[in-house]
Image (cartoon, rainbow, N blue to C red):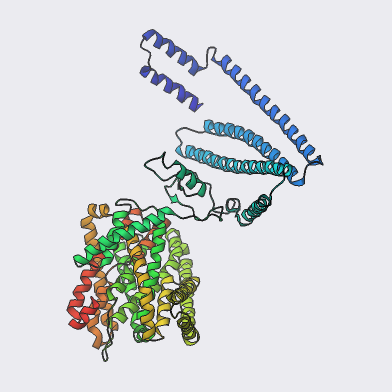
Amino acid sequence: MKVTRFISLWTLVSLPCGPLANPAEREDVVKHAIKLHRGKGAVITQRKQWVLESCRKLSGLLRQKNVVLNKLKNAIRAVEKDAGLSDEEKLFQVHTFEIFQKELNESENSVFQAIHGLQRALQGDYKDVVNMKESSRQRLEALREAAIKEEMEYVELLAAEKHQVEALKNMQHQNKSLSMLDEILEDVRKAADRLEEEIEEHAFDDNKSVRGVNFEAVLRVEEDEANSKRNASKREIEDDLGLSMLIDSQNNQYILTKPRDSTIPRADHHFIKDIVTIGMLSLPCGWLCTTIGLPTMFGYIICGVLLGPSGLNSIKSIVQVETLGEFGVFFTLFLVGLEFSPERLRKVWKISLQGPCYMTVLMIAFGLLWGHLLQIRPTQSVFISTCLSLSSTPLVSRFLAGSVRGDKEGDIDYSSVLLGMLVMQDVQLGLFIAVMPTLIQAGVSTYSSIFKEILRILILIGQILFSLAAVFLLCLVIKTYLIGPYYRKLHTESKGNKEILILGITAFTFLMLTITELLDVSMELGCFLAGALISSQGHMVTEEIMCCIEPIRDFLAIIFFASIGLHVFPTFVIYELTVLLFLTLSVVIMKFVLAVLVLSLILPKTSQYIKWIVSAGLAQVSEFSFVLGSRARRAGIISREVYLLILSVTTLSLLLAPALWRAAIMKCVPRPERRSST
């Protein structure tokens, strides 16, 4: 009633805007509208007549549907009793009749669902947005399910059509004599059909009823072509190969990962073009940075900025590029471990363990203090502080790459301390990722369950410590019994063929990576330990493997740093440049001061001079804050604005890192060693 009165009143209000220019005609229309509103005149008779006719039509259609269903049942019985048909042909015809039955039933259900939806909408209040939203959601779910059912029925009809064509071919082959070649091809065709049935995975049917699976509406778009007529055949081929792109209602883009027909080789041309473009543009960008005295890695980041969403937006497969870039991190840390021998690790393990722990605790304490003053939630303060306490291992590894240093009498090499602390931070990263789900739950928990959350965190920490102990025990066994014979076997088999050596070292690295991942420790630690284990075989082994792995590392590192640039947004930095510079300088200075304070307490007196270099190497934010920030944003720990601030501060701190590093090297390192370090 509310909806009807609203529509009538809206009609009265909108009349002056209509096309009626004559006042007399306008008055007649107004009177007629008033009669409609009050329910008078001949309208009721016409309404009753329309209702009667509609009910007759609907009841007639339902009776006709029941008649057709009975005929289909009789036809199915007749087919099943027909002795002249083969079992396969009987099954096909019965299945075809069942598809038609399903179509009739679904059409009837759609009619009554529409009537039920109209009734529910009329019973609601048009001013109640929540009720309208719920009705819209229910209609959307019904449409999704209807679309899925229609898609399944269409697939069944395609299969029936294919079966019908094959049956026709079989009849033609039976009526004529086949040559030997035709018989061979016919056998091959049947074998190919069996192969498709064997390897086909019913992923859609198997997963549609799984918990957490929702039906989504997606758009299927083809690649934009300048000349559509000339490339029409190419589009048809790509459509058959499944190389188009899907876009859901949340603007997420998807590409094919596993095709239905695995017999046809496919390639993601978008990904190939992205890698080619990054490779070509990285050269001039890296060259430019070398010319002006910056590390080449910033050229690669600039390349990612130019090609990413904030630039030309030409990178289509962002997730795939980032995934390939992760291998750059793996091989970088492998070479770090290759240069970082267990003897050097044993010398500085106390400093490497204590330093990052003290710095993280101090950063969290300062974060909670500032969060209390600025009225920020404790979970958000802890997360931001932990993100900012991490430093970039790949960046510092590039700073130290190629340096040749030996420990002085009674002194500690600054590279050993720095790399040891960075490795410990990677362990903390794995620990923080493991604790992150509990941190998410703590953000929405009540004060009555805080004790349970603290207990859960302590249990998780115990699990991580147990995993670390298991990893290092395994490394001890491998170093004592396995790594020596394994490398000697590789060296013997790879004489004159470096492929076996590269493949063997890579497989060992991935094995350690997999083990640490299974034990809920960071994969990066596994790569580092793989390099450290191999370096225990001597200096000659290290040099040989480094010559083979370094080119692979360099190429993948280019992809990694370019993928960082994909998440740098210069426009946001320009808009908030003053705030971001203040925050970045505050973070860099705070990390530098805290590192100097901690190292002053734990370093021996004879090695106090290296605290400035180590602190300079730690005074930036790790690129893994991108990963942590994205997870926290999806989980609701931080807002979009805080996430962009973390990304921008991380980027600016990485840009400031080379200047701070060079200043520390110029001040603290003697001139001969300075050349090798820079």
Locate residue 407 relative to residue 233 in the image: left or right: left
Residue at (38% x, 17% y) in the render: 18
Q: Nearer the viewer, residue 138 or 197?
A: 197
Which residue is outermost to the top? 24
- Image position, residue 394 (x, y; %): 33, 70
Locate residue 509 relative to residue 332 in the image: left or right: right
Q: Nearer the viewer, residue 241 or 113?
A: 241
Q: Nearer the viewer, residue 323 or 264?
A: 264
Residue at (46% x, 13% y) in the render: 32
Label tally: 0
Locate residue 320 relative to residue 163 in the image: left or right: left
Residue at (29% x, 62% y) in the render: 300
In which quadrant is the C terminus drawn?
Answer: bottom left
- Image position, residue 157 (x, y; %): 63, 41
Locate residue 305 relative to residue 248 in the image: left or right: left
**Image quadrant assignment for residue 142:** top right
Q: Is residue 132 visible?
A: yes
